[in-house]
Structure formats: C-alpha cells, structure tokens
Image: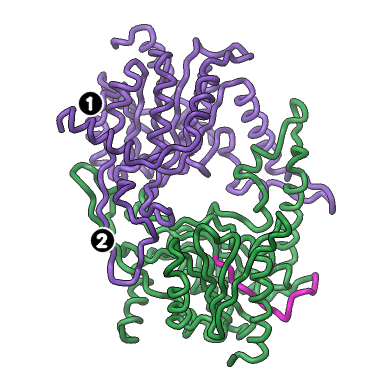
Chain colours: A purple, B green
C-alpha cells in the first residue's frame, strides 16, 4: 500500500469512529500528569511510559449488544506498570475496563466479597488470609496515584483505544526520547466500520450469519513515525503457534520500526518471553527459584536499561 | 424443522462442545443446595429459582484469543436475585464471570481501590461515603450464602452456559412446579461449532475476514418440554428497536411455550418492562417517587404471585 492510500485508510478510520467522550478532560489530565513533579523526587529524569493493557472490543451493532472481544486479563500490563513505577517512571496506564489493576494481582476475582467477613452484626473485617494482599494493594495503589506516578485511563472499544492512544502520543511528544510506549494491549485486527454497522440488533431469524470484517489500519506505523517519532517503542506479538511466533515478531519489528518486539506464546507467556531487536533476540525467563516471581520483573529491567542507552543516543 | 432434525441439532451442539470442567462437583453442589433446609426457616415451600445473568461468549478460535460477546452488565439478574431471596426463594445464580453480583449493585466498579483509604502507614479503612454500601454488601451477601439461599455458579462461554443450564435443570426436576427458571442472561444466537473452529489464532495478513456463524439451537424448547417440563419458565426478550419488540416477545412465548416473556428495550430497560403472557400484557414500571427504586422490585412481586397461582394449579 502506498503512503497516500495508507493515510486515507487511517483518516477514514478516525472519521468513521464515534466521537470520544471527554476528550478535552482526558487531554487536561494528561498534561497535568506529565508536568507534575513528584513530591518523592525519585522520578527518573521525567521519563514517562504509556502502558497499554487488556483487549479491545469491536462493536457489531451501533447500539451495542454484540461485539468481538480480544481476550487479555491485563495481568502483563498491571505487573509491568508496578515495575516501571519502581524503576522511577511515571506511568500512563491505558487499560480495558474490568481488567487487572496494578498492585491488585494477588487479590481474588471479587475482592470485596471474598476478602472480608463479618466481625459482628454491625462490623466487618478483612480475613486474616487476605490481610497482607488487601493492605498492600490499597497502600501501594494510593501511594502511586498520590505521588503523581500513576494515571489510569480506561477504554472499551477499538475506537476509544486508538483515539486515546493518539491523544496520549500527542501529549507525550514534548518528552522526546524520554517518552516510552509499551504496547501490551491485545488490539483487534479486524473491525466493522461504524457507518456500515447495523443500527439495531442483528436478527437471528433465518439461517447462518455471514459477517465481513475489515482490517484495522496499522496504527503502530503512524505512532512511531508521526505521532511521537522520538519515543522509545515496544510492541508485543502474541501467537498460539510457536512455529510462526519469532518470524512474525521480526516482521513486526521491521514493518513498524519498533525498538523492540516482545514475542510471547499463549501457553508459556507467564514463564518466558523473547525480546526481539535489530541486534538479535534475548530470552527472558521468570526466576524459578522463587514462587512469587514473574517474568515482567527481568523484562522491565532489560527494557529500562535499553531505554537509558537510547536516551543517551537516540540514533542507536 | 421436524422434531428428529431438531434433536439432532441439539445433540450435535453438546457433542461438539468442549467438555465442562468440574461437572461432577457442580452437580454435588446443586444437590446439596437444593436439599439443604435453611436455618432461618423462611424458605417458601422449597421454591427454587434459577436466575441466569450476564452475556455468554462465543469463542472464534479453540485456543481462545478472540470471541464474540453479548453485552450485559448483569444488573437485572443481580437485582432480581435479591428480590427472590427476600420473597423466600432459594436462588441458583448462574452468572457470567465479572458481571454484577447480588447486593453489590451500589458499589463502584473497583470497590477495593475506590471504597477504602489509608488510615495511617499500616491500616486502612472504608471511606465514610461508601461505608453503608460496603457494609450492606458484605452483610447481606454473607447472610444469603450462610442461610443456604444463594448458590453462585459462574460461566463464560455459550458452551459452559448451556451445559450448566442442563445440569441445573436436571437437579431441579424433582421440585416439580416449585422450580422456576428466570432466564435473564443474554445468550448468543450464533456460534462457531468447536470442531470447525480454527485451532490457532486467526491470521490478519491478507484482506478482510469473512466469518460464517451457525445458529445456536433453541434450548428454551428442550428446557421447557424435556429437561424440566413442570417448572415455571420466564424468558427475556431484549431489542433495540421498540417497533418489533412485543411482536418478537409474543412469538417467543408461543414458540418456546414460556409461562411469561419479559420484553425490554435497551434504552428504557431500567424504567419499564412488559410481561407478556397468554392472558395479555402487563407493563411494569419503576416506582418513580423514590430515587433508589428499581423495576425488578415490582417485576419479581408479580412473577412470584404468578408462580403461586401456577403451583396451586400447574395446568393454568
């Protein structure tokens, strides 16, 4: 596809999307967050990372009853956010509503009902077994927000996700190479253009349903080359078939000019990932000597080091 | 479709479905729950209702990354469960993971992070503004479970939902007309048969994606006529287009031999519903004189009365 046709495809995606609610408010929040100096003073030279997390949905009807969803628990994004904050980054956490939140990974699915019990007829208390997890979640989450290190922005649809990513990129542009994108969200490859969508619920009366979905334009290219050309960009490649995984990650690295692509396979993604770069591939493993360890710990350490090198010389 | 072809379609749906995990454990739980006599002794002559709630998903790949989802917050099912318990019913709450839970409707989306605050470096407390909601949720939820009035069973896919509904129906069969089904879940009309599904993630390399989805066999018929022929059965009809709503509800009432169909429109569903029966339609409105009222309160009152009449004379 030539460049003019590609830009036309992108413009048509944004023009056909339903307008983003609260876009002015989101821009204000972002600008305040980026400019705010942390009282704890540990921020690493104003480094800001945008972590995207969870899956996007594609509505199949305008008054949305049915949609296609890309599955992602958001665990990777939540864990990575914690390690970025620990490393001194400010994190813009662009997450799918209802997915895993930073500092809440060890809590059960429904924490209020499962972690608390009645002490007597009028009072309740946290169960002993969940006491540390609950205390830690509330303490660390509040501290990150209060210190101006964590800004959370929720999305649901592919339209919201891409519109918000564009606004975030535009706010982060002034940061030059200190900006980083860590694109862990599971973004839909296909969508139904808003205007060609059924206004009402699709009727099930007669026979099978045939659907044609269009490809979502590859926004990684525009993010990298136009929205924030100086930012350090990491994307993810998830496959269920290990045979094609690395090949597809290398293709993505070249096609979208990413600084690194994190390749992961659905079944082993919590144990090992491969960081694919122009200078070769690095396998990153979870520390198996410790039950509570995770692969995001060494992964973020590696990427933070790479980002430091990049800031010193963005041509590398 | 003739009866033999219809049964073949149903058999083929269940045979092609991935086996349900823990089906023996679920059956045990159900039997214990149904037989257990409530210590509070208020159970209305062993009446048991199965409330289904939230939307089902249809996987598009066997190693599920993408799926089609039917949107439903689960608010209707959660509210109705509370009113059924209040009316003396035991409730089997068959709900989509992550949707609204009974007694938790007035809590914010992420209760642990939004309702609690740090008291000092080591302790946290519930925020004053959420104190009553949090206390009420924990107290009422625990009481319902402890009294043997609430059994919660989660599902995600259409395959899990229909397999669990079948097991529940079979456990409730012995209750005769004291059993009730209140089918508020948003069940997919279309699915991809498990065997014809892509094993791996659908690749996005080339052009638009064409998909063919098959119709899910209408299990309401089998539930009503074979699984639990004596149970009192209520189904729901949700449309976005008010012009076709009542017509479709009447069709469903006749086709599936329901005792009532609750017709609701997406935009007004929290204000008004229409209960469609063989003896005519009844509009049920939320009590507008009170801000905290909901339409489920008068709706469940009406249905409980209808159920009482039905128990006295199941031929009505």
**Outermost residue, right side:** A121
Q: Do we see residue B112 in this rendering?
A: yes
Which chain's residue wears label 1?
A
Task: Identify the residue at image location x=39%, y=10%.
Answer: A311
Point out residue A73 in the picture as x, y percentages from the top left corner: 47, 43
Vertical relation: A31 (above or below) B205: above
Please give the range of residues in magenta.
B40-52
* Helix, strand or loop: magenta stretch: loop
The image quadrant that residue A225 belongs to is top left
Q: Are marks 2 and 1 on the same chain?
A: yes
The image quadrant that residue A43 belongs to is top right
Task: Identify the residue at image location x=41%, y=63%.
Answer: B188
The residue pinned by badge 1 equals A254
Mark 1 is surrounded, within 10 Å at the Cα level, by few (under 14), some (14 to 19) or many (20 or more) other residues, namely some
B42 in the magenta segment: yes
Vertical relation: A227 (above or below) A56: above
Which one is in front, A228 or A135? A228
Report the disc number at residue A210.
2
Point out residue A165 in the picture as x, y percentages from the top left corner: 40, 30
Which one is in front, A42 or B109? B109
A144 relative position to A173: left or right: right
């Amino acid at each position: 596809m030539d460049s003019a046709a590609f830009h036309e495809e992108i413009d048509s995606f944004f023009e056909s999307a339903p307008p983003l609610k609260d876009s002015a408010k989101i821009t204000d929040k972002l600008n305040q967050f980026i400019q705010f100096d942390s009282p704890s003073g540990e921020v690493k030279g104003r480094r800001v990372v945008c972590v995207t997390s969870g899956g996007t949905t594609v509505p199949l009807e305008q008054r949305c009853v049915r949609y296609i969803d890309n599955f992602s628990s958001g665990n990777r994004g939540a864990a990575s956010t914690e390690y970025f904050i620990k490393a001194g980054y400010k994190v813009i956490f662009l997450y799918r509503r209802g997915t895993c939140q930073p500092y809440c990974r060890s809590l059960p699915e429904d924490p209020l009902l499962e972690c608390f019990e009645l002490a007597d007829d009028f009072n309740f208390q946290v169960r002993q077994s969940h006491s540390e997890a609950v205390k830690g979640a509330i303490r660390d989450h509040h501290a990150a927000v209060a210190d101006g290190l964590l800004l959370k922005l929720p999305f649901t649809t592919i339209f919201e996700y891409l519109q918000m990513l564009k606004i975030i990129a535009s706010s982060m542009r002034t940061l030059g190479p200190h900006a980083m994108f860590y694109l862990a969200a599971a973004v839909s490859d296909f969508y139904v253009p808003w205007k060609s969508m059924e206004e009402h619920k699709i009727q099930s009366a007669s026979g099978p349903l045939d659907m044609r979905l269009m490809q979502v334009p590859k926004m990684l290219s525009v993010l990298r080359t136009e929205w924030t050309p100086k930012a350090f960009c990491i994307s993810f490649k998830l496959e269920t078939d290990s045979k094609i995984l690395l090949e597809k990650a290398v293709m993505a690295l070249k096609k979208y000019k990413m600084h690194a692509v994190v390749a992961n396979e659905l079944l082993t993604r919590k144990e090992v990932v491969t960081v694919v770069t122009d200078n070769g591939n690095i396998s990153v493993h979870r520390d198996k000597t410790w039950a509570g360890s995770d692969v995001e710990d060494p992964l973020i350490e590696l990427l933070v080091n790479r980002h430091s090198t990049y800031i010193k010389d963005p041509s590398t």
